[in-house]
Amino acid sequence: MKLGRLNHIGVATPSIADSVGYYREVMGATQITEPFDMPEQGVKVCFVDTPTDSGINGTQIELIEPLGEGSTIRGFLEKNPLGGQHHLCYEVPDIDEARSWFEGLGKRILGPTRIGAHGTPIFFLHPKDMMGQLTEIMETPRGGAAN
C-alpha cells in the first residue's frame, strides 16, 4: 500500500458558524460548503477548500461540530473547549486493501468501515498506533472528484 493524497484535516469546533467566519475573515477562504448533518456519526460537517495553482484539488479543512449529546467529538471538545485539530485523512484507492494492510501491521482500527462525509468508505486508526494522530483512511472518490 502507498500513502495517498492528504484529503483533509479534521478540525473540531464548538461552532461551525464561528469557524466559517474565521476562515472567511482571517484566512481569506472563499470556497466553503454548506454545513450538513451526519446523525449516524453525531456531527455536523462543512468543508473549507484550500486553493492550488495546479488545478488539482487542494487539501480541505473539515469543520466538525457536535450534533446532539451522543456526538463522537463531544469528549474531544470537553478536553479542548476552543476546538482544534482532530484528525488527518488520507486517500487510498481501495479501502478493503488498506484495512487489511493496517490490520496486518497490527494497527487498531476504530469501528467498522462506514460511509464518510465525502460519500465514500472510511475507517479510523487509533492515535496510539499512528504517532499520536487520529488517522482517517478514505477511499478516493470515483469519477475524478478528489474532494
Image: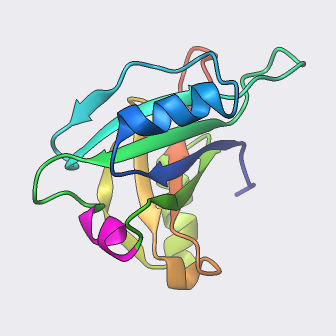
Tell me which segment is drawn in magenta: 74-79
Out of 90 and 42, give the one closest to the viewer. 42
Q: Left of 36 or right of it: where is 71?
A: left
75 is within the stretch colored magenta? yes
Query: Where is residue 111 shown, x and y percent of the image?
Result: 29, 65
- Quarter of the view holding residue 8: top right
Q: Residue at x 53, y 53 (%)?
A: 137
Q: Left of 127 or right of it: where is 54?
A: right
Q: Which image quarter is the N terminus in?
A: bottom right
Query: Where is residue 17 shown, x and y percent of the image?
Result: 37, 32
Out of 129 and 14, give the one closest to the viewer. 14
- Quarter of the view holding residue 105: bottom right
In the image as oriented, which residue stretches furthest toward the front? 25
Residue 12 showing in the rendered view: yes
Residue 105 showing in the rendered view: no
- Main secondary-structure element of the magenta-colored stretch: helix
92 is within the stretch colored magenta? no
Rendered view: 125 above or below 37: below
Query: Where is residue 96 shown, x and y percent of the image?
Result: 46, 52
Out of 132 and 16, give the one closest to the viewer. 16
Out of 2 and 131, give the one closest to the viewer. 131
Query: Where is residue 113 shown, x and y percent of the image?
Result: 34, 53
Q: Left of 123 or right of it: where is 53?
A: right
Rendered view: 100 above or below 121: below
